[in-house]
Structures are given as structure tokens and as C-alpha cells.
Amino acid sequence: MSLFWIPLLPLLGTLVPLLSERFGRSACALFTAILPAIALAIVLNLSLEVLQGNTLLQSFSWIPAMGLDLSFRLDGLALLFCILILGIGLLVILYARYYLSQQDSMSRFYAYLILFMTAMVGIVTSNNMIQLWLFWELTSISSFLLISFWNHKSDARKGARMALTVTGAGGLALLAGLLLIAQIVGSYDLDVVLASGDTLREHAAYPIALVLVLLGAFTKSAQFPFHFWLPHAMAAPTPVSAYLHSATMVKAGIFLMARFYPVLSGTELWFLIVSLTGLATLLLGAYIALFKHDLKGLLAYSTVSHLGLITLLLGMDTQLAAVAAVFHIINHATFKASLFMAAGIIDHESGSRDMRKLNGLWKYMPYTATLAMVAAASMAGVPLLNGFLSKEMFFAETLHQVALGSLSWMVPVLATLGGVFSVAYSTRFIHDVFFNGEPIDLPKTPHEPPRYMRIPVEVLVALCLLVGIFPGFIVGDLLASASSAVLAGNLPEYSLSIWHGFNLPLVMSLIAMLGGLVIYYNRRHLFQFQAQFPETDAKLVFERLIQSLVAGATEAHKVFENGSLQRYMVLLLLFALVLTAGPLMDLNTTAGLRPHLPIDAVEITAAVLLCLSALATMIWHRKRMIALLTLSVVGLIVSIAFARFSAPDLALTQLSVEVVTVILLMLALFFLPQKTPKESSPRRVVRDLGIAAIIGGIIGTINYALMTRPLTSISDFFLANSKTGGGGTNVVNVILVDFRGFDTLGEITVLGIAALGIFKLIARMRLFMPAGDENGRPWARDRHPVMLAVISQSLLPLALLVSVYIFLRGHNLPGGGFIAGLVTSVALVQQYVAHGVDWIKERLKIDYQWLIASGVLIAALTGLGSWVFERPFLTSWFDYFHLPWIGEFELASAMIFDLGVYLTVVGATLLILANLGKLTTSHRPTQPESE
Amino acid sequence: MLNTAILIVSGILCVALILNLWRLLRGPDLSDRILALDTMYINSIALILLYGMHMGTNLYFESALLIAMLGFVSTVALCKYLLRGDIIE
């Protein structure tokens, strides 16, 4: 159980700072630290078991249908990372308490920080690859929030965006890689994956999976050529940099490589990609770091370089190299976190990070200077400090490297070169900042920081020293346990002592020291040399790239979507033509074998009326009002046809929809020109006419062909099961509320959303009423004629009765919630027409938005209700009852569902119509302004 | 006897409907057209009721009821549009 708490406690902790902010800044920091501290205590408590070589596992069923479990593991590697993440995280919390100014929102900062911590802990403890990836993406998002914490600064926003884009894109590649691995191995479970290294390596898709996973790792760990985002992420507050760029964010990529080391490494491809990328990053980062005048910029590139070093070690693919990599992960985290914190202190207390201004701070802050110098010496790899030990192991490993054949000598030489630059920039950090004359016009007079701000630095520097002097005692067990997790149990012999005798690695270290000092001493020449190169700002390049990407996408988008509805229509119809013409030509005869039904005079009359009114609509489509009238005739005839051909349900629906549509169109028409100008050229009219005629012919043919053939469809199933399965004899209604209830639920939700959308669009809109109609006649004076008002009012109870009647009989006879809803709406709209909005508002105190919400809610709850009886969602229930006076009647859960439909329909219709009507009610001048 | 009556009446209704449409298409005024549409509603009611009698079922009477009710609302809205432009004030 306790494994589960490790990520869960920080997750809960995300809320703590938000709740505790009002108790003051120190209390907020203290409360925030509690939950991560408990999580750390759990980790330490479990560590005894892990250090004995056990792997703790725990899983919960998550999405069993997809074979996904929430699964956590704690092995040596996860333990090491958990301690780093939670331990340094706690120090950062303390540090940030003093770093953040009064203007910064402490709770927001801590909430982001703890969210990020959760994500990191989640990555390292995940035992399921999809789960790991989710946490991975969460680090991208939370680091975006952290980097852009000072979101009033443009460079913070740009840097955060860049980090998100690069790491997010890498995350997608990683997802693809993980899915591919799962395909090959057959499981998302890390246990299974880690045990099937050979299967994976021999599979044909291995190179693709490897490259995809490495893309994810390299982007996250800022490896060349993706290193450019990391320096720009320095726009974040320094505690963030200290956390993200020492122990966490960038180490996630390293962690990923270490995690998949047992299954992905051991091939030529792994060696080539990983070691060469690592080497390039190591050299590039170390070289650029020397030229950065910004304190944090120097540290950023140094981080890039050290990450390259770890990557190179992992790429070298020997067991000892892997141990060295794990060791350097620990060491880099400690000295880099303390250096960032020291840089933050200097920035905080002197107001600048520019090393051209910062000089001679030793006099002002000797204590901080000592701490920073020890950490920087560790970064340079000075003996008796932890950086020395892992660097020594690194040098030793480069000497044993033979994979490059006769070129293998290059690796140790280049590694030493990297060491030289590392010493040079470390020296610059020490000498430029703390000595080298006097400060040059700093904004503040530098002084020592508050007592507690130094504590995190002290702790970390003490660790650097202790690990450096007593390596075996302090981290021996942890290192062995983590390394054996990386190496899948095959731990090689190694020695963690400081003195291995006078050997080649020591010579390389000495060369690096001396070379670094020489380079630093002659730095002016190098600076002059470097100044000849034009400085490229990665931010500008990146933004330009993104902008051209957006422009390209917009162009491509325009080709398909130019905003012309006519064009879409033409494309759609032409495509339908292409699709249907072929099969229809293969059909030998249009008419099937079914005999024709007899035709009588009424039907012919209706057909003539339908055709004529449809034609009239088309011919007069530019005289909108008349077109609306002829359209009503079309609707009427269609409804009658539905009734005639045994579809009374459809007839009722069609009728009610018809009237609502007419009212809606009239409401809209009032604000539109009464006549549409002629827009289409004659050629276009001919073209459109041609397309329309062909499509009409095709649809007619399909219908005719279909109706003259005997056809078995799903209807028979519904007819057979409607009474027995759904308890209703009205098949249409049973389909709506039972067989396809889930569809209906979706539809009423969409209806509700559409209504709210329309309401939102027109809520603040105010349109002035024209003085008279299109012919200039003034409007009638009488707004609400008495006769109309009286008749409408007396009609209302009858109409409501009709709708109740239609609602209740819906399950067995034509009717149902949808039709009843429309009838009720029409009845109420009638009152709006007769009495006006203000009159109704006083009498009908119903909020239509609430009505929609409650309708959808009732329908959804009815569906959920079946869960109580352990049935699938929306299973309906019905039974028959007998009451005196009333007789036999049926109760069905589908009726409650139908009630939800009814309420949603009423709410949506009235929300739209009443608000469209309201557009002119307020602010309307009683007399036209033109007069 | 009843069947003959139904036959004759439906013939008359068909003629009436066609004449309604004629008026609707010809106009000349918008109020003529609205009146024509309203009469069409009424004739449709009659037609549906007649069909129900012919088939000996009352399944279609709700359609007639709804046409009666909704047709009225529709006509009222159209008239309001003529009078005031803005149908819901």
C-alpha cells in the first residue's frame, strides 16, 4: 500500500499551498513541505528492503479492458531518483521561501513545484509504460508552468513555450516508441518489458523503437541538437532552475535511458547514437559555457555538458560505464543544485547575474563564496569532492572503449578536452565572481543572504564533501542498488576509493586541471576569437520556425477550407456523385421486383403541390418571406405524407419542428435584408443547376431502386423486440429512449450545448428596429392586440394538456418527450408572441439554462441508475401496475429518461427563441431616430 | 354510402388545396398568401381526418390536432411579422 502513497502524497500536496497561503509565507512553505517529507520518509523506510536487492511492486486495476494497470515499482534506480527528487525538492521549498519576493504568488509557485515533483516521482516509480508516459507529459506541462512563472516577462513566456514544444514533441515520439515496444513485447508492464531484452533487440522494428524512445530522452535531457531549449528555460526563478536542471526534469531523459538500458542497449546502434550524441553534447556544452557572461547561462550550458557526459557513459555500453553514469547522476545533482542556489543568492543579494559586473564578492559574502567555490570545484572535478570520483571513473571508461576501432583513442582525448573546458568555466565561475577586482556598478550592495536561505546550499555542499571523502560509506549501497537495477542484476567489480594509484585517468584529470587553468588565464584571446562568430539567438530561430510552420499550416488549410459554403456544397455533392455513379451504373435495371402500390387522386394532388411549392421556393428564394411561405407548404405536405404512409410519429415530429423553424426563421429574417441581391453569374447558375439536377436524379434513382426491392433491415429486430425488450409498442419511441438511448443522451447534450452557444452569442447583442417594413410602411401601433392575447391565453392550458397527453402515451402510441417538448415550447412561444417578453418574465420564472441542465442531468442519472442494479449504463426497466379508478398502466424507467429529453427540448427551444426575440426589446427607441 | 361520401369529399379537398396553392403563388399581397397557407392547414386537417375515417383508425387524429394547434401559431406569427416585424417583443 505504501508504494502507492509515494506519488499520491505529493499529488495531494499540490493543494496544500493553495489552502495554507493565508497563514503567511513561512507557514505556507512549512505546510507545503510536510507531505513530500512524509513521502520521503516512506521511501527511506522502504529503502532497507530495496537495498537488499528486492524490487517492490504494487498495482491496481486501472482500465482492465485495455490491459492497463496503475502499477508502481520501487527498485534501486527508482529509489535513487525518489531520494534525489524528494530530498532536493524539500531543500528547494526552503530555499524558495526566501528567494521569492513579496509580489510573487507563493502558493501558485509551490503548487506548480509540487505538481512537478509528483510528475517526476510518478515517472520514476511507474511500472506501466503508458502510466510512465502520462507522468512524463505532466512534467512537460508543469515545467512549462514553472518556467513561465514570471509570466509578465516575454523571455520567460518564450522560453517556457520553447521548452514545452521541444519536450512535448519528444514526448509524442516517446509515446510512439513505447507503443511500439508494447507491440513487440506484448505488454505495457515494465516487468515484462525489462525481461524481454533479447526479443526486443532481435525484432525488425527495434531500430525504430530505439530512435523514438531516444528522441524522447534526448529532447528532455537537452542533448545535442535539442539542447537549445535548456538555456532559455533559465528565465525561470532560480529555485526552479536549481530543481529542474539538477535533479529532475533534465534527468528524466537520463532516467529513461537508464530504465530501458537492460532492454535497449547492447547493440551497435545504441552505442553509435547514444555515445556520439553524448560526446557532442559534452563538448559543445562545455565550450559554450565558458563564454556565457550570465551566471545562470554558464550553469545551464554546464548542465548540458554534464548531461552529455552521463549520456556518453550510458552509450559506452559497458557495465562499469553504467555504474559511473549512475554515480555521476548523484554527484551532478548535488553540486549543480547547490551551484544554482548559490547563483540565485548572488543574484538576489547583488541584483545582477552578469559576470562582467560581478567581481570580488568574496569581501561581501565570504560564507556563500566558500560554499559556491566548493561546489564549483566539485563541478571541475577537484579531488576530495564527489565530482572528482565520477569524473575519474568516466576517464577510466573512455580508455577502455574499443568500439570505434582504430579511432578509439579519440574518445579519451575528447573527454579530456571536455574536462579542460569544464575546469575552465568552473574557474571562471569562482574567479570572476568572487575575486578579480571590485564589483562594477551593481544595483545593490551585496551582502550575505538570510540564515535559512543558506541551509539548502550547506546541506548539498556537505554532501559533495562527504561523498567525495567517504564515497563507499555514504552512497555505496545506494549506488550498488541503483546500478544493479540499470544492469539488470549484473553488478561488476568496482572500487569507490579516492586513490587508485598513479594511473592514466589521474593523468587525464591533471591535464584537465592544468589545461583548464591555462585556458582561463588566456581567456581574452578565446573571447576575441569567439566574438568573430555572429551570435544566433535560438529563441529567434525557434520562433521563426514555429511561425513558418503556422503559416504553412494556414496555407494548407486554406486550400481545403476557404469559408465558402457554396464551394463545400459543390465539393460534397461532386464527391457523392463520384461515389454513387459507379455502383448505380452496375445496376442493370432501376426497378426491382416489388409491385407498385396503387396511386390515387389525393396522392397525385399532394405530389403536385409538393413539386410546385418546392419549385416556387427555389424560384423565389431571393424574396425571403414568400420563400418561407412556400417552404411551409413543403413541410406540411411532407408531414401529411408521413401520416399517410404509416409514420404518424414522424408526422408529429415534422409538424412541430416545422413551426419552430418557421418562427426561428422569422425572428432571424427580421434583422436581415428582405430581398437577397443577385449574386451568382449566369454561368454559375447553369453549373449549379446541372449539378443539382444530376444529384437529384441519382438520389431519386437510389430511392426508387431501393423501394422496389424487398429489403430486410434492422427494423424487423426493433419490431420484434420493442414490446418484450423495451415494454412499449411505439417502436420509434422505444428506439429513442431504450435501444438507442445512448444516442439520444448524446443528442440532447448537443442540443443543450448548441442552445447555450447561441445564447452566449446573442446575449449582449442589441439591434435597433427599423422604422417600418420593406415598403416603408410604419409598423402597427398595437403591440399586443387584445384579441390575440385573450385567445392565446385560453389556448395555453389546452396546448399544455395536449403535450402532457402526447408525452404520456409516447411509449405505446405516437408521441414522446421530443414531440411533447416541442409542443410545449410552441405553446409558450405563442404567449411570447401575444404578450411580449416582459409580460412572460413576470409570470414564468423559469431559467431555461437550468431547465436544459436538469433535463440532461435527469437523462444521465436515469442511465446511471441502472448501475445501482448492476446493469450496464441505460438499461431500462418497466413493469405493469394496477390502480383502482385508473386501471392497468405501465411504469418504465425510460419515461424518466423521456422526461429529461422533454425538459432539454423545452429549455433549448425557448432559450433560443426567447433570446432571439429579446434582441430588440431593450433600448429600442419608441420613435424611429431618423424622423 | 360513407365510402362514396369520403371519395367525393376528398376530391373536393384536393381541388381546394390546389386552389390554395394557386392563391399562395399568385398573391398578390403577403396577407393573401398567409391566408392561403392557413386555409391549406385547415384543408390538410380535413384530409387527414377523412383518411382516418376511411381506414377506420384514430391513429391519425393527433396529427390533425397538432396541425390545428401549430398551424394557428404559425399563422399568428406570420401576421405578427406583417404587423410589427418583430414577432417576439
Image (tube, coloured by chain):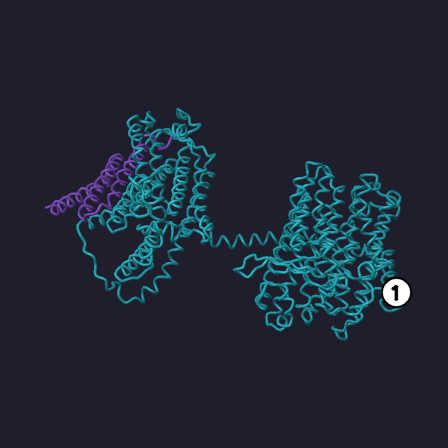
Name the colour assigned to chain A in the rendering.
Answer: cyan
The residue lying toward the viewer, choosing from A753 and A521, is: A753
Whether residue A530 sits left or right of residue A224 in the image: it is right
Whether residue B20 sits left or right of residue A465 in the image: it is left
Give the labeled residue for mark 1: A499
Residue A565, x across and y down, in percent: 41, 49
Instruction: Tally the numbered discs.
Output: 1
Residue with the most extreme left position: B1
The residue lying toward the viewer, choosing from A856 and A205, is: A856
The residue lying toward the viewer, choosing from A240 and A441, is: A240
Residue with the most extreme bottom position: A406
Task: From the rendered image, report the letter of the chain displayed in purple.
Answer: B
Note whether A258 is above or below A820 in the view shown.
below
Is residue A15 visible in the rendered image? The answer is yes
Which quadrant would residue A848 be assigned to in this image? top left
The residue lying toward the viewer, choosing from A808 and A853, is: A808
Residue A607, x across and y down, in percent: 23, 50
Q: Residue at x 20, y 50 (%)?
A: A603
Note whether A571 is above or below A26 in the view shown.
below
The C terminus of chain A lies in quadrant: top left
Note whether A292 is above or below A199 in the view shown.
above
Whether residue B22 sits left or right of residue A816 in the image: it is left
Is residue A567 visible in the rendered image? The answer is no
Residue A548, x across and y down, in percent: 59, 53
Which quadrant would residue A201 be assigned to in this image? bottom right
Residue type at numbered disc 1: Trp
Identify the secondary structure beneath mark 1.
loop
The N terminus of chain A lies in quadrant: bottom right
Note whether A253 is above or below A767 in the view shown.
below
Crowdedness of circle 1 by 10 Å Cα count: few (<14), some, many (20+)?
A: few
Residue A695, x across and y down, in percent: 33, 56
The chain containing the residue under callout 1 comes to A
